Image: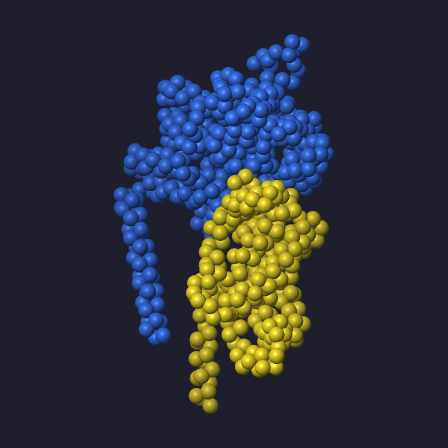
Chain colours: A yellow, B blue
Amino acid sequence: MANKRNKDWSAYLYLMPVIVILVIFHVLPIFYSLAVSFYEWDLIGSPEFVGASNYLRLADDPMFYKSLWNTVYYALISVPLSILFAMLIAMLLNNPISAIGLYRTVYFIPVITSINAVAIVWNFIYHPDFGLLNKILDIFSINPQTWLQDPFWAMPCIIFMSVWKGLGYNVIIFLAGLQNIPKHLYEAARIDGANRWQQFRHITWPLLSPTTFFVFTISTIGSFQVFSQVYMMTPRGGPLKSTMVIVYYLYRKAFEQFEFGYALAIAFVLFMIIFACTLFNKLYLEKKVHYT
Amino acid sequence: MRNFLIATFLCWLIIVFAIIDDDKKSAGAAMIDASSEGRTQVVFWHAMGGPLGIVMDDLVTRYNKSQSNYFIKSVNMGSYDTLAKKVLASLVAKEAPDISQNYETLTKKFIRHNKIVCLDDLIASETEDIKGDIIPVLLDNNTFDGKLYSFPFNKSVPVLYYNKDIFTRVGLDPEQPPRTLEEMVKYCRIITEYHRTTPGADNSVYGYGCSKANVWSFLNRILQYGGKIVSDDGRKSHFADQPAINALAYLQNMLKEGIAREGQGFDHQNDFIAGKCAIIESSIVSKVFMENSIEFNFGVAPLPGYIIKPNPEMTINESEINRGVILSGSNINIFNNGDPKKIAGAWDFIKWFTSTEIGAEWSIRTTYLPVRKSSLASDYMQKALEKDPNMAAPYVQLDYCYFEPRLSVWFEVRDLMADHLERATLEMEPAENYCQQMGKDVDAILRHATH
């Protein structure tokens, strides 16, 4: 009995470092933010209690809704796209071809490159006058576009770049998922005369679903927090605020207009949205997942 | 696996010890720098990078050598934005620097919460009439409710840069930059037309370049058209008035005609350097950043103005041109950290830095305005102006120089204005539509703001 208790304690001891870090840098700030969101505070003076007025102001702030919609737009396009491409590439990279290590490395390089450096390079690619993209379009006699300076194209440009940047990470996860699928299932299917599509539909897709679910959840959370590429590539939130996403909006409110209470109210609403999405994924979508 | 873990752990240990050692060393260096000589250390945060940072470091080093009471520890924080964020964070942490560069909007907040020292108290003990020697517009810019709370430090004005080689090529007089807004349109038309129609000429060359949603340029032009920005009590904007509409329509018309182009960020400046764009409006400080890359003759001139009541002969009489420019750049605050010795050191440094000789040198080397009238008149300044006539444009404009409204919500207002300006040149509907909406939206903010 005494032995068992010792074992329990040692488990907590091992968990200690992570718990301390999580509490100090995640749990406490969340509650602190919630508290400050009921105050008006410019950091210079002392916070002034204003009740729910930050939240009321949020409820009829058109720019808040615009940034919320832009974020949803970003998530709706970027999450399915990145899952689709990552799964496709992972299946290709799962084949025994030569120099496979090289290909896997190439797809992973964007992930480990600093987002700021990547954003600067993509700024050049999208440049209206001497950008690579317009030069390529020119070969096919397609009219040059102003890309990041065009209210219609700015967000798709950001989405495309973000999908490319995050691809390698999802590919690695899908690769791990694919390698967990027992080979004998495919052999049996082939003996039964199943074609490639049928193998994918009835073996790969269902057995990969825990991985897909994980990637979907992580990507959704990540896409609601998109910030760096927007900040780097479309200063001021893009042409006609077409790339003003919610995190960038709260950043501007906090660090450019010094309305910390209001910014934290936005942050807390964002937290609730992400929380609700994740809860939905967990309670509803996870039922559709096959765990082997 | 085990070996790998041990190796990782050892690497980690080495890094930790290296950091600890480095910390000790830099702490040691600071000790030698300051305390060991019994000096008071004064921490100065600024945002002067690149060529400006070099001049700044040089002057700070010279100050530290020039006397033995104080030691200025200057730290470059990067951009103005980053500096402002760090200053605010340091105030919360109660570790504010002793001096920092700041905009007027922040200064107002500092005053309200008693975070900075009133400079009138420090000036009171001086024998010299410092205030009397400060350039009037700079003095007004830093005076809040009749008291001097911040000190002008690196203030700049916008100027016109033009490519003299292009002027010569198209048959314009390279020593005659446009004096009025109409002249500028005319010149831009000639320049663009010439390059489009002359065989062998680079047909991508155009007249006037600027950045998108440029609030500064819009405000300058409102003044040139004889308008006002906000009412004296700061409760109402004047953006729906005719001068503002004219200011916006002016840019829209040039863009529509194809003789001007808008770019993102510093695109217009790069186009100017590349010889694609003949005329740009930019801060005089851009000169320091551009001049080493420019491979043609260029001129720097005051911004063009507008003749409000043209004479019947339609001739341009210099005295009838209504001009106006708006200051940019930051001021310096002394934080109230409770140590009179540090405050005295901070004030001593500011006095030295903005003194007649050093101020003139700072101005010539960085193109920022000097703080004192006596700097303007100094031999150093006069000799430098003789050598490079392009230096004179900012000083000429001091006669009609203003500053932006110092309202607590001004950052927010500026941001909103930029949205409307951006929309105006993207959709190109009549200027009054945008100006009226801008006025309405800005007034809504101004009404609710606490000043």
Residue for point 48% across, 45% down:
B82
Closer to the camera, B217 or A160? A160
Q: Quadrant of the C terminus of chain A?
A: bottom right
Residue B21 seen in this snapshot: yes
Residue for point 37% across, 31% down:
B352
Closer to the camera, B306 or B171? B171
- How many numbered discs sit on the rendered protein? 0
In the rendered image of this protein, does residue B406 appear above or below residue A125?
Answer: above
- Image quadrant where residue B77 sits: top left
Residue B348 seen in this snapshot: no
Which percent across, then down, holds residue B243?
67, 26
Closer to the camera, A163 or A230? A163
Which percent across, then down, holds residue B12?
34, 64
In the rendered image of this protein, does residue B389 appear above or below residue A216?
Answer: above
Which percent across, then down, holds residue A79?
61, 61
> Which residue is at the far top?
B313
Which percent across, then down, holds residue B158?
52, 28
- Image quadrant where residue B257 sits: top right
- Image quadrant where residue B9 sits: bottom left
In the rendered image of this protein, does residue B234 appear above or below residue B15?
Answer: above
Q: Is B256 situated left or right of B374 in this image?
A: right
Residue for point 57% across, 62% down:
A85
Q: Is B225 situated left or right of B290 in this image?
A: right
Q: Is B247 situated left or right of B75 in this image?
A: right
